[in-house]
Amino acid sequence: MTLTVTALLLVAALVHASWNAFIKGARDPVAMAALIYGSEALLMVPALFFVAPPPQSIWLLLAVHVVLHIIYKIAMVAMYIHGELSQVYPVTRGVAPLLVTLLAIPAAGEIPGGAALVGIMLICAGLLSFALERSKVAGAGLRPLLLAGIAGIVLSAYTVVDGLAVRIPEAAISYVVWMFVLDGATMLVIARVWRGERIYNAMRDRWKTGIALGVISALNFCIVLWALSFAAMGPVAALRETSVVFAAIIGALFMKESFGWRRIIAAIGIVVGIVFMNL
């Protein structure tokens, strides 16, 4: 993986951590998530008139992605309601690189080399060490960790689905456009069911922030999809999930969450893992 791709994925990781922090810190996380995903959909609706209709194989991948992403969004919002950003976010993102690597072997025939595998393992270990601190686990209970684990497993599955779809040259752009539109539409439905009519007032209060975050979130996801179109899925997932380090820093600076020596050592391990993946 080139340094340019690595740098872009690290930028995407920072952006991802930032908009997730806004969801966690929002008065109503459901409303903020609806604004972000809904804004992504609105951005892509005009593009529907300029892309070719997806072929049948792409519709199948889209259906799988949408179902998985519905589960992911429900688990994600619920874990932020019940847990700390600096704990649940690392659990979700920490399990993804290794699971994506394993799923990509049968799905795409991708067998990582020795250095890449060492890098992925180091990054996974560093990510999970952010979350599995004994005092935090005891204080938070199992519910937020279980929700975060479910989100991480589903995230891994839809990452592989996305990787397979964007590697079909004649259908990649159509897949991306329809994916954003369907993700936004389903999140708005989830929010309406979850919060009832109250969701409209909650969204109205923070609509400017939500739209701005939706724009940068869409750019972030496009960078990841672009990387997945030609790079091995496991390393892409590993670099993307370094967003955990940024999330921990944001949690420490703005949400008064701890950031001790254990997390500094974990962050160093993640950096070493990135170096190994670029050997």
Image (cartoon, grey):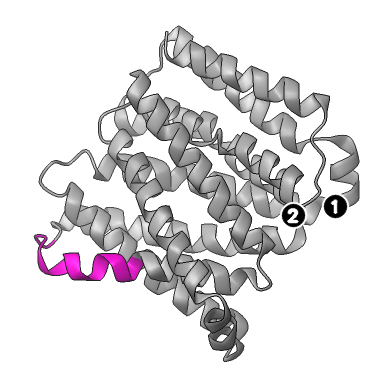
Residue 37 drawn at (x, y percent) = 43, 65
Residue 139 drawn at (x, y percent) = 90, 49
Q: Quadrant of residue 3?
A: top left
Residue 16 drawn at (x, y percent) = 51, 47
Return the residue nearer the eye: 196 or 263.
263
Label number found at residue 144: 2
Q: Is residue 1 above or below residue 38?
A: above
Task: Quote the CA–CA distance across marks 2 and 1.
Answer: 7 Å
Looking at the image, residue 107 sits to the left or right of residue 103; the answer is left
Residue picked out by circle 1: 141
- Residue in the image at 61% along x and 44% along y: 92
Instruction: Identify the amino acid type marked 1.
Output: Gly
Dot 2, how many residues are within 10 Å of its Cα: few (below 14), some (14-19), or many (20+)? many
Magenta span = 41-53
Residue furthest bottom in the image: 197
Say which element carries label 1. loop
Dot 1, how many residues are within 10 Å of its Cα: few (below 14), some (14-19), or many (20+)? few
Return the residue nearer the eye: 85 or 103.
85
In magenta segment, residue 50: yes
In magenta segment, residue 92: no
Q: Is residue 253 above or below residue 120?
A: below
* Contact flag, marks 2 and 1 (Cβ < 8 Å): yes
Evaluate whether residue 1 shows in this view. no
Residue 191 drawn at (x, y percent) = 54, 77
Looking at the image, residue 158 sits to the left or right of residue 141; the answer is left
